[in-house]
Amino acid sequence: MKTKILQLHSKHFQWDAILLVIGIFASSKVPAAWAQPPHAAIVSTPARCCISESAPYRAADATLSRKRFDLYHKLSVNIIRTELVWREMEPRAGEWLDEYHLNHIKLAQQAGFRLKMNVCTISAPPAWFLAAHPDAKIINEFGDWSYNTLSLWYPALHQIIEQITDRLFQYMAAGNLFTNLEFIAPDFGPASEPLYPAVWTMGPHYTHGPTFWCYDANAQADFRIKMRAKYGDIAIANARWQSQFKNWSEISIPPPKKRPGPFWEDVLTWYRDTKREFVRWQIRNYRAHMAKYKIQNIPVLLYVPGFHISEEEWSAAITSGAGAKNIRSMCDSEFLLETARHENCWLQYTGSECEPEVAYLTGYMRQHNFSIPMWGENAGGPIEAIDPSHLADVILKYGLFGLDYVHSYYVFEKDGCTPNTIFPQLKAAYSRIQRR
């Protein structure tokens, strides 16, 4: 057991050396007009202490932002997670905002912080786009649609995402946002995570609970196409499903619990594989744009959300014709770990307050003989944010790379710059992580 622990730690020391090289490369590109030596001297390597800057804070005036950045330095924070968001940058069709809307990110660079950047495309369609393209809406069995993701079966999805990705990368290039860029996160769905819409992404007035999101017309058509390609003859499909469809046009995805057994197993597998195909494509899309804009030596970061799906849960979903909430949002954890290994990506688990799940994910990687740096992130609710010491315990116990604390507003009073009682606790937690 001791040997395994030593091996894991030695691999993290290798990543420390890599990050040191990245840090030297990034710091050499800081424009002279943005340099602030007093802050630059505070930033340490490796950048294990990250804080996710809240959306309202990104719109704050420069004076308030600078005060908050000074406090981040006191926390030992050396990397800030922020976002470049399609709906914010193109509020009306064809009307892209000027670069001054990125001043908050530039201020963070001036203050010496490295950047973990979410480039939000599929998760951030503007209201005008969904109004103009209703067939781009993703729909559940109740007819609800999500304002924070596009349907994975929308025929023009790849074309639109490629265009928006390129436009946002243009912003980053024009604003010198590649300077101090430490990680870039491809956008896979709500909150940039590789999920179908979860309840917490649907707003405070949503009442239907966890649902399946495969009921728009394009999804139904794609399911018929995939089943015809799989079985060829409708008679073969009927024999497996114990059904009596006369032709492929009669087939549709029913509400949960209406058709359990082999038919629902095909629905679940198709639902899962659609998300998998998009994850693979989106990684290629972002990597192509990184190459186009000559972004080198910057890791691609994959978010691993929720709780993995056990074999028992999968079997129970087939039997019932429904599925637990992690199946409805399709938390495909093992696939994401394997994809990170295959695509040479980093990982970030988005619920690291849950020690059993962290134990499962790190145990899976040990069991399958691979080690990938994985950040820890607390879920975004207040309960998960109030105990930074526990977060540090989990980070250190399971060898996670560092802590990305979500959200920054949990450590300040309402004015956004007065530390509250959680602030010193987070400072102590970061200090423990950084000392490692």
Image (cartoon, grey):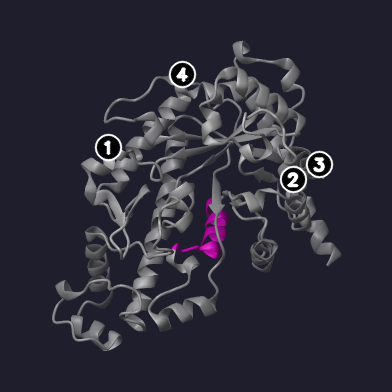
Q: Position of residue 313 (x, y in %)?
A: 51, 76
Residue 14 shows which numbered tag?
2
Is any part of residue 391 visible from this angle? yes
Main SS of the magenta part reads: helix
| Quadrant of the frame with the C terminus | top right
Which residue does the image show at 30% across and 41% down from the upper left? Answer: 160
Which residue does the image show at 31% across and 57% down from the upper left? Answer: 144
Q: Amino acid at mark 2?
A: Gln
Crowding at dot 4, Cα within 10 Å, few <14 / some 14-19 / many 20+, comes out as few
The reply, left or right, for residue 128 in relation to residue 201 is: left
Query: In whole angstroms, how far apart are the C-alphas of marks 1 and 2?
Result: 47 Å
Please tell me whether residue 430 is drawn above or below residue 201 in the rendered image. Answer: above
In reply to whether residue 333 is colored magenta, the answer given is yes
Crowding at dot 1, Cα within 10 Å, few <14 / some 14-19 / many 20+, comes out as few
Q: Amino acid at mark 3?
A: Ala
Give the secondary structure at mark 1.
helix
Is any part of residue 188 visible from this angle? no
In reply to whether residue 126 is colored magenta, the answer given is no
Please tell me whether residue 257 is drawn above or below residue 221 in the rendered image. Answer: below
- Circle 3 is placed at which residue position? 428
Q: Amino acid at mark 1?
A: Trp
Question: Closer to the N terminus: mark 1 or mark 2?
Answer: 2
Please tell me whether residue 303 is drawn above or below residue 164 in the rendered image. Answer: below
Query: In whole angstroms, how far apart are the C-alphas of marks 2 and 3?
Result: 25 Å
Q: Which residues are magenta?
A: 329-343
Give the secondary structure at mark 2.
helix
- Circle 4 is placed at which residue position? 100
Query: In whole angstroms, how far apart are the C-alphas of marks 4 and 2?
Result: 38 Å
Question: Closer to the N terminus: mark 3 or mark 1?
Answer: 1
| 9, 311: nearer the viewer | 311
Residue 128 shows which numbered tag?
1
